[in-house]
Structure formats: C-alpha cells, structure tokens
Image: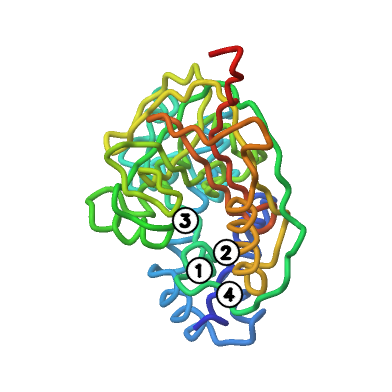
Amino acid sequence: MEQWQKKIQHVVDRIDDCIRNKHDESLTLKLLAQEFGYSESHFSRRFRQVSRMQFRDYLRYRKLAFALRQLRDTDNSVLQIALDHGFSSHEAFTRAFREAYGLTPSEYRKHPVPVALRTILRPFDCYLMENGQTGMTSTQGRVKTYFVTIPAHKFLHIKNYESIGYWDFWQKQSLIPGQDCETICGLLDSIPDKLDDLGGDEANSGSGQIMGFINDPAGRICSWGIPLAECYGVRLPLDYNGPVPPQMLLMEVPEGDYIVFEHGPFDFETENSAVEEAMEQAMREFDYSASGYHLDLTPGRVFYFYHDCKRFWKYIRPVRKEQKLSEL
C-alpha cells in the first residue's frame, strides 16, 4: 500500500501543476494510467482506495479550490475564472461551486466566509503516518539555537487537553463533529493573510498551518512539567477582523521573546527519528542559566511547532529575560 500511496501522491502533485499551468489536456484518467503502466480500471480503483473518492470528483474539487482563491484574491470576472479552470460556462461553474461550498461564486466574492475546502490529498503524509520512517541517519550538530522577538499577532485554532502528539491529536479530534482533520484544514485553507503562508498561487495546500501548545492550567502536564493544551491553527495579523469558524478559537498573542531550536531540511523516511532525537536533546541540554533567559510558563503564552521536512523542523518556545538583582 505504501508504494501506491507514493504513486497517488505523485498524481496529486501532477494534478495541481496542470491546473496551475492550465494544462488540462494532461488530466485524464487514461493518460495518467498509461504513465504508470496500468489499465484505467485498475488505476481508478487504486486511486479511489487511497483517496476515498472518484478521480473525476477529486479533479473537480481541486479546480474549484484554485478557482475559489482567484475569486477571493483577484478582480478577474467570474466567467473568466470559470473558463480558466475548465468549466464550460458561468452556469456550470456556479452549479459546481454551490454544490461544493453551499453558496454561489458571486455570493462568496461579496462575503468570503470560511468554507471547508477539499484539502489537497496527502496520501503519503509523513505527519499522519503513525509509525514514521525506518532509518536512523545521524544528524549530530545540525540543530541551531537562537533567540527572536515575535511581534504581537493572533492565533486561530482548535485545542485538545488530552492529546499527545500530532497523530493522537487528530485521532481525538475526529471524534468531535466538525473538528476532523479534513474539515479543520479545509476551513483554515480558506482563511486569507496567514502569517506563515508561503504565498504564491498554491490553492488549498495546508500552507501556513502549524501545531501549537498553549500554557494552560487546564492542560495536560507534558514531559517538561508544563500544563499545555495542544493546538492546531494559523497565525494571523494582529489587525485580523475576519470571520471565525464556530468550532475555532481566536486569541491575541502579545509580542514576546522566544528561543528557537531549528533543524534544516531532512528526508522523512530515513532521518525523522534522528532529527527528533537531536531536537529533544538540544532542548533538554540547553543551559538557560547561562543565556540570561528562562522558559516563560505564564498562562496564555504559546509554543509553536513547525514540522516541514522540505524546509525545517522547528520548536519555538516562549522565554523571559532573567531579572538582575538590581532590578528586583
């Protein structure tokens, strides 16, 4: 199954590239099946097995996701957006858009409320693989440590007091109506101006979404002895005043100092465990007393966690400067 997950991931990436570059002629089940050397029926069955939807349905949802971003972020006419994304007419586009999102393209453009986009399929999603990679490549000496001041911003999120780790978090959230991974990620994808969004013309990509941990007296006690509530969400500008999905929370995070533990790009399949061990060791052995800072356990301060194997693995932990005796 893992090999097919990787193949379907390649297909998913190809679909987005073709939509982005308007190469719709390449997006046929026949051509993609031929590329992998399988019959249409076998390829279609495998795609449905991995993605849990028909190929044609996934293709339509992806085109709509790209089109939605155009409606939100450009002044292009609805008709032009429809034609650019493979719809034969304004009417056909409107019908498909309403079916997917519950409102027409014109209604969405006037009031771009959060909608649960069909998030991009990640059949080979390293973050949701319970067992992770198999290798143990050494990463000694590749963790950077530095201090930063992060300006005040807002954090739109959901949180769980009981979960332990990304996999467990989404397993528990899936038991809560409207808080499963697909719905939450889809809603967050439709939120504009995310501070961590990579930008560009990506649609519905998960870009800008991060894990977080909030110092919270009601949270579980983690291995550092700190009561934390595990969260998932997006960082937004301080002046964000857009809508908040009803199942999410929006909090203001004041300006503060943070310590960053950062590892560069790595191969998930062969290095993930080694990188995790190196990061844990770096955080465990860091000498706060010599740095002039200490971890800030004040309720409401937020830890951020970035796990993007193509860019970095990064823990951002809130700190506060030690007060000198003369200041007390």
Most foreground residue, 133 or 147: 147
Mark drawn on residue 133: 4
Which circle marks residue 12 in the picture?
2
Query: Given the image, on which type of amino acid does mark 2 rest?
Result: Val
User: What is the crowding at mark 3: few (fewer than 14 residues within 10 Å), some, or many (at least 20)?
Assistant: some
- Looking at the image, tell me whether mark 2 or mark 1 is earlier in sequence order: 2
On screen, residue 288 above or below 59: above
Considering the numbered disc 4 on the image, is that residue within a helix, a strand or a loop?
Answer: loop
Q: Residue at image x 41%, y 62%?
A: 167
Relative to residue 138, is residue 53 drawn left or right? left
| Mark closer to the observer (2, 1) | 1
- Comparing marks 1 and 3, which lies closer to the viewer? 1
Q: Between disc 3 and disc 4, whose residue precedes?
A: 3
Pointers 1 and 4 in contact (CB under 8 A)? no
- What's the distance in space between the residues labelled 1 and 3, CA to CA? 18 Å
Assess disc 1: are there few (<14), some (14-19) or many (≥20) residues with their C-alpha within 10 Å of its C-alpha: many
User: Label 4: few (<14), some or many (≥20) within 10 Å?
Assistant: some
Q: Along the polypeptide, which appears first: circle 4 or circle 2?
A: 2
* Of the image marks 1 and 4, the number of the one nearer the N terminus: 1
Helix, strand or loop at label 3? It is: helix
* Mark 2: few/some/many CA within 10 Å (<14, 14-19, 20+): some
- Label 4 vs label 2, nearer the camera: 4
**The disc labelled 3 sits on which kind of residue?**
Arg
Query: Disc 3 designates what residue?
Result: 60
Hey, what amino acid is under mark 1? Pro
CB under 8 Å between discs 2 and 1: yes
Q: What residue appears at the point 48 percent right and 74 percent down from the top-left corner?
A: 131
Residue at mark 1: 123
